[in-house]
Image: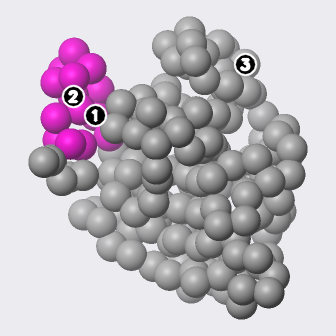
């Protein structure tokens, strides 16, 4: 049986040798707790590489958000069984309690608290959010550090928020728990 790390290393071969997961995608893949047929949302799906990787392993219902309508169209063509939309991270166009997992393998674009509130809204009870954090990066003005991000996640309602290391990136993981399951 292959470990997640070994599976990630083989991905370029499976996709023709020209596609690789970056460190943040690897962190999301390493720390996402997924099961067969889970419904996941990649908030920054880019070209769909992370979704493809995870779907090959778990057979998921895949959804993603892209920065541009053209990029969304291209990813929809690549992943024809997926629901890929153009939109902003702080205005997620899905209903409440829709997803088993939300992944954010790239920098937040928008106001972090609003993005986390939206993420919490669309997660099902028992759902997980994984936010990748580069290990070596210079924070831009207005960007949150990992401790502040974890604090805001807790304020929004996420439980069991923790930071985990994975190669050259880390991941902040939080869960949506039932109110009586504090």
In the image, 3: left or right of 57?
left
| Rendering quarter of residue 38 | top right
Q: Earlier in the sequence, mark 2 or mark 3?
A: 2
In the image, 88: left or right of 70?
right
Q: Earlier in the sequence, mark 3 or mark 1?
A: 1
The mark closer to the camera, 2 or 3, is: 2
Q: Is residue 28 visible?
A: yes
Quarter of the image with the C terminus in it: bottom right
Mark carried by residue 69:
3
Give coordinates of residue 154: x percent, y percent.
71, 83
Residue at x-position 74% and y-position 27%: 86
* Residue situated furthest bottom in the rendering: 182
Judging depth in this view, the residue of 4 and 47 nearest the camera is 4
Q: Is residue 115 visible?
A: no
Q: Are marks 2 and 3 in contact (CB under 8 Å)?
A: no
Give coordinates of residue 111: x percent, y percent.
79, 61
Mark carried by residue 20:
1
Judging depth in this view, the residue of 80 and 90 nearest the camera is 80
Magenta highlight range: 7-21
Residue 174 part of the magenta-drawn span: no
Badge 3 element: helix
In the image, 134: left or right of 173?
left
Q: Earlier in the sequence, mark 1 or mark 2?
A: 2
Query: How many marks are shown on the rendered structure?
Result: 3
Q: Are marks 1 and 2 in contact (CB under 8 Å)?
A: yes
| Rendering quarter of residue 15 | top left
Residue tagged by mark 2?
12
Residue 10 part of the magenta-drawn span: yes
Q: CA distance from mark 2 to mark 3?
A: 26 Å
Give coordinates of residue 55: x percent, y percent.
43, 33
């Amino acid at each position: 049986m292959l470990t997640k790390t070994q599976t990630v290393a083989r991905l370029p071969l499976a996709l023709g040798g020209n596609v690789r997961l970056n460190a943040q995608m690897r962190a999301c893949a390493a720390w996402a707790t997924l099961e067969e047929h889970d419904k996941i949302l990649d908030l920054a799906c880019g070209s769909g590489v992370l979704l493809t990787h995870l779907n090959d392993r778990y057979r998921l219902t895949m959804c993603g958000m892209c920065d541009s309508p053209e990029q969304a169209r291209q990813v929809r063509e690549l992943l024809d069984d997926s629901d890929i939309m153009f939109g902003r991270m702080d205005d997620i166009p899905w209903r409440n309690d829709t997803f088993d997992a939300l992944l954010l393998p790239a920098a937040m674009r928008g106001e972090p608290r609003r993005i986390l509130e939206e993420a919490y809204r669309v997660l099902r009870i028992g759902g997980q959010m994984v936010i990748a954090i580069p290990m070596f990066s210079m924070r831009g003005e207005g960007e949150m550090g990992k401790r502040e991000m974890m604090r805001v996640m807790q304020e929004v309602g996420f439980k069991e928020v923790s930071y985990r290391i994975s190669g050259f990136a880390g991941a902040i993981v939080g869960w949506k728990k039932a109110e009586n399951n504090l």
